[in-house]
């Protein structure tokens, strides 16, 4: 009886120690993983926000530059038309067509660049949304791990109670 009691007590202590060690290991690993993921996600978010701001700035500068260049081309054309003699009407007409084609080409290029920059901005926004979803999933996993740890704790308490009951039963036996 005494030996059984000692063995039961030792097994109980051993189970309790193993449970605490496993729980501590799981909690430590989980917290380290969450901290690392949090740092990585924060760095990614900051980088994406900086990239987005840079793209928006570049988009604004490109639009301004192209608008300014288009305005200059139109002004130069207008000035040429005013200063030319009527005998050069044919040459002016050719020059006008050249300037218009050049202006149209540059405007199309500017629009294409603007579309490309907007597409890049949208892509970055989508990537940011995906990172946000991943972070929410990580927090959900954390909650699941906490629930599992609570289940382990409850099971350990049940086992401890069973061991106590067995000890009492052993003690009551003649």
Image: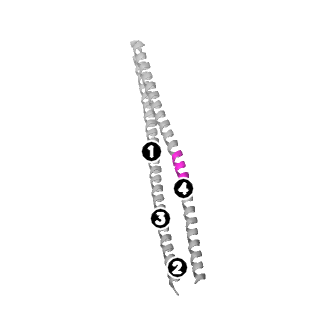
| 85 and 147: which is toward the camera | 147
Q: Position of residue 150 (x, y in %)?
A: 47, 64
Count neighbours of disc 4 (C-alpha within 10 A) and say few if under 14, some if 14 to 19, many if 20 or more.
Answer: few
Residue assigned mark 2: 167
Q: Secondary structure at mark 4?
A: helix
* 2 vs 1, front mark: 2
Sequence-first tag of 3 and 4: 4
Q: Considering the image in quadrants, where does the N terminus appear?
A: bottom right
- Can you tell which mark lies on residue 146? none
Residue assigned mark 3: 150
Give above or below for 26 relative to 73: below
| 121 and 97: which is toward the camera | 121
Q: Which residues are magenta?
A: 30-43
Query: Could you tell me if residue 98 is visible in this image?
Result: no
Sequence-first tag of 3 and 1: 1
Q: Secondary structure at mark 2?
A: helix
Q: Position of residue 107 (x, y in %)?
A: 43, 31
């Amino acid at each position: 009886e005494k030996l059984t009691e000692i063995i039961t007590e030792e097994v109980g202590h051993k189970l309790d120690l193993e449970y605490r060690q496993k729980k501590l290991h799981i909690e430590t690993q989980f917290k380290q993983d969450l901290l690392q993921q949090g740092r990585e996600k924060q760095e990614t978010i900051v980088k994406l926000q900086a990239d987005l701001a840079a793209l928006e700035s570049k988009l604004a500068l490109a639009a301004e530059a192209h608008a300014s260049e288009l305005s200059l081309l139109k002004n130069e054309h207008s000035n040429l038309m005013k200063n030319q003699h009527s005998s050069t009407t044919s040459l002016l007409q050719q020059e006008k067509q050249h300037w218009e084609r050049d202006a149209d080409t540059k405007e199309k290029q500017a629009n294409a660049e603007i579309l490309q920059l907007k597409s890049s901005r949208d892509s970055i926004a989508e990537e940011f949304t995906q990172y946000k979803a991943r972070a929410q999933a990580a927090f959900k996993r954390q909650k699941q791990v906490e629930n599992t740890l609570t289940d382990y704790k409850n099971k350990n308490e049940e086992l401890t109670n069973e061991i106590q009951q067995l000890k009492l039963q052993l003690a009551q036996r003649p």
